[in-house]
Image (tube, grey):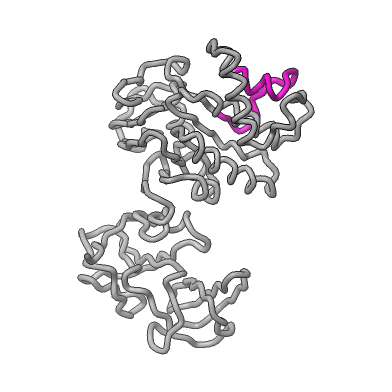
Amino acid sequence: MAEITLSHLKHAYLPQPARPEDYALKEIDVTWRDGGAYALLGPAGCGKSTLLNIISGLLTPSEGRVLFGSEDVTALPPDRRNIAQVFQFPVIYDTMTVRQNLAFPLKNRGVDEGTIAARVGEIADMLDVTDMLDMRAAGLSPDNKQKISMGRGLVRDDVNAVMFDEPLTVIDPHLKWVLRSKLKELHQRVKATLLYVTHDKTEALTFADEVVVMQDGEVVQIGTPVELFERPQHTFVGHFIGSPGMNVLPCEARGDIAVFEGHDVVLEGAVTGAGGDVALGVRPEHVSVAEVGIPATVTKVSDVGRHFVVEAQVGASSLKAVLEEAPPEKGSAVHLAFQPNKTRVYRDGWIATEARA
């Protein structure tokens, strides 16, 4: 296992990139500690696979370095990086038994039979497949095949990292929760450095200690699931993380006040910078119905089980509020209040307020 550092990493598929938009992967600087669980999260085409291929050695970056611990592995091929990888589709040998599949990576490295038997038994117990060890892999269900594929990635305890590339894509939706929970449990027990690539927000936020959110080849925020929700650094993060996503509303910024549809809104702190496209950001969970506040008209009420989602119109702007209590009726006139310490201004997409100490 090793700490992984990406230093000034950039990649372009063009031979002579000259502009920022020429890069499929814009500059990235990040360090993942040894033994942590990390997710690369973003929509299709955001650069996740490019980054994973660079880390695994399938692709050499145009600029920057990849370090495993203190070793520069940027130019090393995959077989010299000592990593394991689990793909979207199960990679197992159908003609082998489950036991033989789990043992295969260890046999290839000349591990003694006693150690192989002990390690296979340990991983099988973690995956709840002990009773399948002598079954042919060809007869397994898709979710059990992917379990074995995951086990093959985790069976070695000497790898620098285990990388998962959308491993639950082909799994039936009602079984995904089971495998997500199992993967979290596995990480807590094996303590390997795990990198998990996904477009699925639930998978990323359930699995990872820290999440790297990507958009258009750029890292827009790195943080814990709580940090991504509580203080999005970019409007994309606010919209992408959370359901419903963050309200992004037109405004004017004046000191530590935003003017939204003619109404003053108190912010978490002073606004920084100047110029650009300015917007007000506040999550629906931080909007409430109050005795006094911004006048609004309720346009829709949705009961989603644990709470209500209320859509309202303020002037030309539509926004949402998440309410735990009984909501106002559609068409009613209400006043909305924004929680000041959770209300921010964004400039050209990036956060532009300073949180009060």
Q: Residue at x 37, y 43 (%)?
A: 219
Quadrant containing the C terminus is bottom left
Quarter assignment of residue 68: top left
Q: Residue at x 63, y 39 (%)?
A: 169
Instruction: Residue at the far right: name it.
Output: 139
| Residue 125: percent from left, percent from top | 64, 34
Quadrant containing the N terminus is top left
Q: Residue at x 74, y 32 (%)?
A: 131
Q: Residue at x 55, y 84 (%)?
A: 328
Instruction: Residue at the far top: name it.
Output: 110
Instruction: Count numbered badges in the picture.
Output: 0
Q: Nearer the viewer, residue 1 or 168?
A: 1
Q: Is residue 108 left or right of residue 95?
A: left
Q: Nearer the viewer, residue 287 or 115?
A: 115
Q: Does 98 lie within the magenta span?
A: yes
| Residue 183: percent from left, percent from top | 56, 40
| Residue 23: percent from left, percent from top | 37, 33
Tell me which segment is drawn in magenta. 86-104
Q: Does 186 lie within the magenta span?
A: no
| Residue 354: percent from left, percent from top | 24, 62
Q: Nearer the viewer, residue 348 or 37?
A: 37
Task: Determine whether 8 is above or below 76 in the image.
Answer: below
Task: Determine whether 141 is above or below 210 in the image.
Answer: above
Q: Nearer the viewer, residue 210 or 188?
A: 188
